[in-house]
Image (cartoon, grey):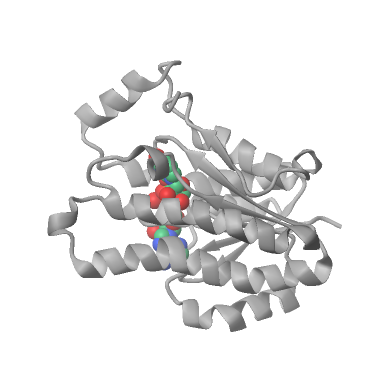
Amino acid sequence: MKKLVMVTGARRGLGLAICQHLAADGFKVLAVARANSPELQALCDGGDVVYEEFDLAHTDRMHAWVGGLTKKHGRIYGLINNAAIGSDGVLATMHEHDIAQSLLVNLQSPMVLTKYVSRSMLLGGAGRIVNISSIIASTGFSGLSVYAATKAGLIGFTKSLSRELGKAGITVNCVAPGYMDTEMTKSIAPDKLLSIKRRSPSGKLATVESVAASVSFLLGEGAAMMTGTTITVDAGSTA
Ligand SMILES: NC(=O)c1ccc[n+]([C@@H]2O[C@H](COP(=O)([O-])OP(=O)(O)OC[C@H]3O[C@@H](n4cnc5c(N)ncnc54)[C@H](OP(=O)(O)O)[C@@H]3O)[C@@H](O)[C@H]2O)c1
């Protein structure tokens, strides 16, 4: 029977690429998004991806929702916390509501979701959790201080949770992508983009496919001895 993996933020960008990669690698995928898209629907038509609608800002509804999903689809083996908000802007002029929303969707929501999904893994005595962080968590980037804090928070969350869940056969890791061409990065100014490209040793930038491949690796047998760590996929930007 195929192992069941939940992927958040599956409508587009990296989340969609992860769903595609995992389905190709033999997993059954629960693709969580606020709305469907033609690209996601095409994946669902393939039979190994199931669309599940949920707004991850509603942490108060997660317990019941996860319970319903496990009843419907069975025990969840993998969880990919990918959904996030970009929240671009200098801190001095950022609305407090936007700060709170970033903390909620990028940090609190993955924590609460992991709390309930990990119960299913604990019962099964096996599981894989992958949190999508960012190189910004450790490098810094002007205009992304709140976003960076949420992504650094995920790394701290990952390390301690790996210690909590290790004996139960559950690994917890991060993947930290560098710049990828998605909706999230559409607003990056051309001069900033040029300097990101200039810093890359290969002159290339990470792609959603290359990051999805690392996520899939962390779900496979080859990564059984990896936990509490972060894989950087940035085409060498931080070298
Ligand atoms: N792009 C980059 O350069 C880059 C670099 C490093 C790390 N990352 C990380 O990679 C991950 C994927 O980003 P991306 O580049 O693919 O960005 P994206 O295209 O903006 O995708 C983000 C996804 O998150 C979903 N999302 C946001 N708020 C949500 C909510 N309340 N409930 C449910 N879903 C919600 C969005 O849903 P909707 O489609 O409904 O809006 C969207 O599908 C993120 O964790 C991001 O921080 C990206």
Point out residue 110 in the picture as x, y percentages from the top left corner.
Answer: 52, 64
Residue 113 found in image quarter: bottom right
How many marks can you see?
0
Residue 31's image quarter? bottom right
User: Which residue shows up at 43% across the image and 28% down it?
Assistant: 238
**What residue appears at the point 77 percent right and 69 percent down from the top-left corner?**
122
In the picture provided, is 75 more to the left or to the right than 129? right
* Residue 14 pos. (x, y %): 50, 45
Q: In screen coordinates, is 29 left or right of 54? A: right
Looking at the image, which is closer to me, 234 or 161?
Answer: 161
The image shows residue 16, relative to residue 121, as above or below, that is above
Residue at horizontal 63%, vertical 74%? 116
Q: Farthest residue in the right direction?
A: 1
Identity of the residue drawn at 32% across and 40% down: 140
The picture places residue 170, in percent across and down from the top left corner, at: 74, 58
Q: Judge left or right: residue 85 versus residue 213.
A: left
- In the rendered view of the protein, which quadrant contains the C terminus? top left
